[in-house]
């Protein structure tokens, strides 16, 4: 793949591929952006739309806005220009008949299982408006990307996260006790279409010479997946294993490369179950905000993941880089760091000396 703003593309991919294999070339991979940087702004506004949904559904505007945002930029390290079709993180739930409410920078799902009989009205449909719009965004981006940027697939959240979108997280917590069989039934419905939806996107992208990549912007020449289930931060490990682990196993066994999205300290209790899966190659540890900063207090967790033979994606503030380097071994780390473009070459040189 040749990109105008990423002339060292193949060398950067070699570092990523080494990282997936628990190896390191000259330095750890580094992406010059923080977690969720892609969701810091929405499609923008100029008064031409009658509603926020109409603005989000303007596929040409979304693609052109992204293309304009990378114009003239140089992408250092393992930072890749990636357009991922985006209608918000709950779009997989919407593919089955739920509706989305749109805000300026994200969207939310309207809970639609008020009674368990409502589950019978949910099903994946290829004619669903949200599914078709993601397809339109993908095709348009592929038409316009050549030599400028990569095209990825949309953010997909299946299993219990999808069920929580349909049902409501607080209510679902009680359902685990009151009617676990209904929860398993709903999870089975979400699981039924998940891998086939993933494969549809993967086939389209591969047909057009694209790699497998989504919102984390870590590409793979195989099938790249970011399994996650933020809902389980409220569950015991026993319930994690009973209600989510079977879905997780099925997802990761289908993929070439996986990075588990461990969102917050509430997920740490499930780490042993996650690390036990050989098909999980790495863990993205998201420490949170407020009292959960800085990253240094979480070094034992990061070292625990390293010790299990998994890679670790970590977010660092620029001021944390030197203390972090002093305490950590570089093997297995993938650093995400927001830094001005002018200092990025110097940071790369520093990482080579680690």
Image (cartoon, rainbow, N blue to C red):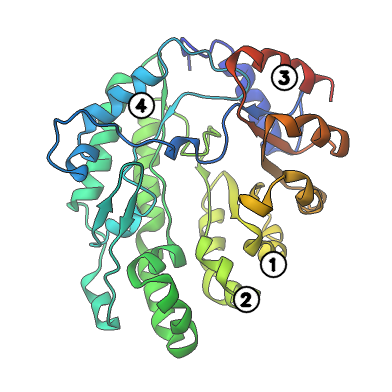
Q: Residue at x 60, y 19 (%)?
A: 340
Residue 208 tag number: 4
Q: Position of residue 179 (x, y in %)?
A: 42, 88
Give whichever of discs 3 and 4 has the lower sequence position: 4
Figure check: 121 above or below 19: below
* Residue 300 appearing in the image: yes
The alpha-carbon separation of the residues under discs 2 and 3 comes to: 41 Å
Kindly check if marks 2 and 1 are in contact, taking CB atoms under 8 A apart as contact: yes
Report the disc number at residue 126: none
Q: Residues within 10 Å of mark 1 (few under 14, many from 20)?
A: some
Rounded to the nearest angstrom, the CA distance separating label 4 from label 2 is: 43 Å
CA–CA distance between discs 3 and 4? 34 Å
Which one is in front, 12 or 170?
170
Which residue is identified by label 1?
269
Residue 109, x across and y down, in percent: 31, 59
Asked if residue 26 shows in the view, the reply is no
Which is in the foreground here, disc 3 or disc 4? 3
Q: Nearer the viewer, mark 4 or mark 2?
A: 2
Distance from Cα at disc 3 to Cα at disc 1 = 34 Å
Element type at marker 3? helix
User: Which sits earlier in the primary sequence, circle 2 or circle 3?
Assistant: 2
Camera-side residue: 68 or 11?
68
In this rendering, position of residue 217 left or right of residue 279: left
- Looking at the rendered structure, the number of numbered marks drawn on it comes to 4
Depth check, front residue: 307 or 207 = 307
Marks 2 and 3 in Cβ contact (< 8 Å): no
């Amino acid at each position: 793949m040749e990109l105008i703003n990423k002339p060292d593309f193949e060398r950067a991919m070699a570092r990523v591929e080494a990282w997936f294999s628990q190896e390191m070339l000259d330095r750890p991979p580094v992406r010059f952006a923080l977690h969720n940087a892609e969701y810091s702004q929405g499609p923008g506004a100029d008064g031409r739309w009658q509603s926020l949904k109409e603005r989000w559904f303007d596929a040409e505007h979304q693609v052109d806005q992204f293309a304009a945002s990378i114009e003239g930029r140089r992408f250092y390290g393992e930072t890749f220009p990636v357009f991922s079709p985006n209608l918000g993180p709950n779009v997989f739930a919407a593919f089955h008949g739920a509706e989305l409410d749109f805000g300026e920078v994200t969207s939310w799902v309207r809970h639609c299982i008020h009674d368990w009989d409502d589950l019978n009205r949910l099903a994946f449909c290829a004619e669903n408006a949200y599914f078709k719009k993601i397809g339109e965004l993908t095709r348009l981006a592929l038409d316009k990307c050549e030599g400028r940027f990569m095209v990825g697939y949309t953010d997909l959240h299946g299993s219990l996260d999808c069920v929580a979108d349909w049902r409501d997280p607080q209510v679902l917590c009680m359902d685990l006790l009151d009617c676990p069989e209904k929860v398993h039934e709903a999870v089975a419905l979400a699981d039924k279409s998940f891998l086939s939806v993933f494969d549809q996107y993967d086939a389209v992208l591969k047909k057009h010479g694209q790699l497998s990549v989504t919102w984390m912007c870590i590409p793979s020449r195989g099938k790249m997946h970011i399994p996650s289930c933020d809902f389980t931060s409220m569950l015991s490990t026993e319930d994690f294993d009973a209600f989510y682990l079977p879905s997780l196993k099925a997802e990761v066994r289908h993929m070439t490369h996986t990075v588990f999205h461990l969102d917050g300290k509430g997920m740490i209790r499930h780490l042993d179950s996650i690390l036990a899966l050989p098909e999980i190659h790495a863990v993205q540890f998201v420490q949170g905000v407020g009292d959960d900063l800085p990253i240094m207090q979480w070094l034992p967790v990061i070292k625990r993941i390293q010790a299990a033979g998994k890679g670790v994606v970590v977010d660092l503030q620029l001021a944390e880089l030197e203390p972090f380097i002093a305490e950590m071994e570089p093997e297995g780390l993938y650093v995400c760091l927001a830094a001005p473009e002018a200092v990025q070459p110097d940071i790369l040189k520093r990482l080579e000396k680690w």
